[in-house]
Image (spheres, rainbow, N blue to C red):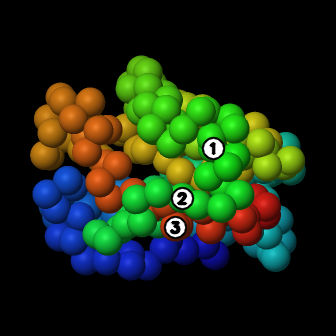
């Protein structure tokens, strides 16, 4: 059975940018619901899931038994996307990446600020619920994408490194309809050390 990440901070630690009530509700209600549904769906399919990471499952959607495939994609994506989202955040974030990762950002996007703008545009450009992502491909090339609902870039062959959740439950209690303010403010709590660690070490499996 799969699990959600343990938050490395308290619910109120991301204030004033993300409020305690939002973090608690988002983590303990929304993410928990995706997790519970995923694990319940996999009951009776233990042999399929045995020894597999969630990243592997979402990267190989056609291997999922057809009768549970869409439920696993929806809820497995919900778990994976939320685990990444919460792991990217910190009350004491490193504000800039460095080394080869920063070099790749500069080569691909020009500079970090341009990359942040493009991720923000991807998040804002997602009509309805979804995410803006920074991803890498299997060769380490970076790109910005958005996904609808709980779809994961893993299913399109990309490794997600950073995400901005633009489902309303991620921001509405504090920002109401002002999604742009949330997207702009979240950079104050995104930890580039965490993102860089994924770039350097994560192969998506």
Tell me how far mark 3 sits from mark 1, CA to CA. Answer: 14 Å
Q: Circles 3 and 1: CB distance less than 8 Å?
A: no
Is residue 96 found left or right of 197 in the rendered image?
Answer: left
Residue drawn at x 38%, y 79% is 8
Q: In this view, does 185 lie above or below 57?
A: above
Q: Is mark 3 on a helix, strand or loop?
A: helix
Is residue 100 found left or right of 2 in the rendered image?
Answer: right
Q: Nearer the viewer, residue 113 or 18?
A: 113
Is residue 75 found left or right of 186 in the rendered image?
Answer: right
Point out the tag, 3 or 1, that comes first from the N-terminus: 1
Residue drawn at x 29%, y 69% is 91
Tell me how far mark 3 sits from mark 2, CA to CA. Answer: 6 Å
Q: Quadrant of the C terminus?
A: bottom right
Point out the tag, 1 or 2, that comes first from the N-terminus: 2
Q: Is mark 2 on a helix, strand or loop?
A: loop
Q: Name the residue under label 2.
A: 97
Q: Name the residue under label 1.
A: 105
Tell me how far mark 1 sits from mark 2, CA to CA. Answer: 9 Å
Q: Circles 3 and 2: CB distance less than 8 Å?
A: yes
- Confirm whether residue 112 shows in the render: yes
Q: Which of 120 and 20 is in front in this view?
A: 120
Q: Name the residue under label 3.
A: 193
Foreground: disc 3 or disc 2? 2
Point out the tag, 3 or 2, that comes first from the N-terminus: 2
- Confirm whether residue 83 shows in the render: no
Q: Nearer the viewer, residue 150 or 19?
A: 19
Residue drawn at x 37%, y 66% is 93
**Residue 189 placed where, x, y %?**
32, 59
């Amino acid at each position: 059975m799969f699990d959600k990440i343990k938050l490395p901070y308290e619910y109120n630690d991301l204030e004033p940018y993300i409020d305690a009530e939002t973090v608690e509700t988002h983590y303990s209600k929304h993410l928990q619901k995706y997790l519970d549904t995923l694990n319940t769906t996999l009951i009776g399919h233990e042999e399929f899931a045995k020894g597999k990471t969630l990243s592997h499952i979402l990267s190989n959607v056609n291997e999922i038994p057809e009768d549970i495939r869409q439920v696993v994609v929806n809820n497995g994506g919900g778990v994976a996307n939320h685990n990444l989202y919460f792991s990217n955040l910190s009350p004491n974030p490193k504000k800039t990446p460095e080394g080869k990762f920063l070099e790749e950002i500069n080569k691909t996007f020009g500079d970090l600020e341009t990359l942040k703008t493009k991720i923000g545009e991807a998040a804002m450009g997602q009509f309805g619920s979804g995410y803006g992502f920074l991803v890498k491909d299997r060769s380490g090339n970076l790109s910005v994408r958005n996904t609808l609902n709980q779809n994961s870039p893993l299913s399109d062959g990309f490794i997600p490194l950073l995400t901005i959740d633009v489902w309303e439950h991620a921001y509405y209690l504090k920002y109401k309809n002002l999604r742009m303010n949330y997207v702009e403010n979240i950079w104050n709590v995104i930890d580039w050390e965490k993102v860089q660690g994924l770039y350097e070490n994560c192969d998506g499996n």
